[in-house]
Image (cartoon, helix red, strand yellow):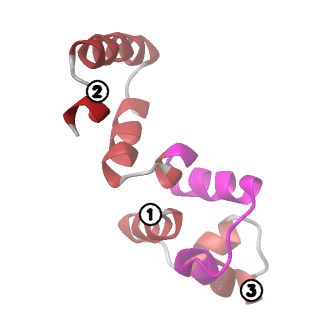
Amino acid sequence: MFAARLKARRLAIGLVQQDLGVALGLESRIAQARISRYETGTHVPDLKTALDLANALGVSLSSLVAESDRLGQIIELVRQLPEGQQEELVKQLSALAASSPSKSEKE
């Protein structure tokens, strides 16, 4: 998931692998190859690098590692809200979840 989301976000903002790598502080001669390895899943970045990638792409690390695309999208939408609205949304979601049958009950 991380690899695919990393690539999708990079393409969405119009960056080439080389530029993203250089933005991370990688040497120009290795930047494209390193980002390519991250995007194909050949190499998994350490936590600091993953956080740096998310920051360079303007997204949260959570959205890149969420267990589903929908959850990643929700994280990014909530992240755009002011803190007070985020808190209100959490209350509303908590109430909704409490009133809904759990996933295991549905199965």
> For the residues carrying marks 2 and 1, which lies nearer the camera in this image?
2
> For the residues carrying marks 1 and 3, which lies nearer the camera in this image?
1
Question: Is 46 in the magenta?
Answer: yes
Badge 3 crowding class, 10 Å Cα cut-off, few under 14, some 14 to 19, many 20 or more, is few
Label 1 to label 3, Cα distance in Å? 21 Å
Query: Secondary structure of the magenta portion, mostly?
Result: helix
Q: Are marks 2 and 3 in contact (CB under 8 Å)?
A: no
Label 2 to label 3, Cα distance in Å? 48 Å
Q: Quadrant of residue 69?
A: bottom left
Tell me which segment is drawn in magenta: 35-62
Type of amino acid at the residue the image marks with label 1 = Arg
Rendered position, 10 above or below 17: above
**At numbered mark 2, what does the secondary structure look like: helix, strand or loop?**
loop
According to the picture, the residue beneath numbered tag 1 turns out to be 5
Type of amino acid at the residue the image marks with label 2 = Ser
According to the picture, the residue beneath numbered tag 2 turns out to be 102
Residue 15, percent from left and from top: 48, 72
Residue 64, percent from left and from top: 50, 54
Q: Is residue 66 left or right of residue 96?
A: right
Residue at left offset 42%, top offset 12%: 87
Q: Who is closer to the viewer here, 18 or 34? A: 34
Residue at left offset 79%, top offset 79%: 27
**At numbered mark 1, what does the secondary structure look like: helix, strand or loop?**
helix
Q: Quadrant of residue 104?
A: top left
Q: Who is closer to the viewer here, 75 or 30? A: 75
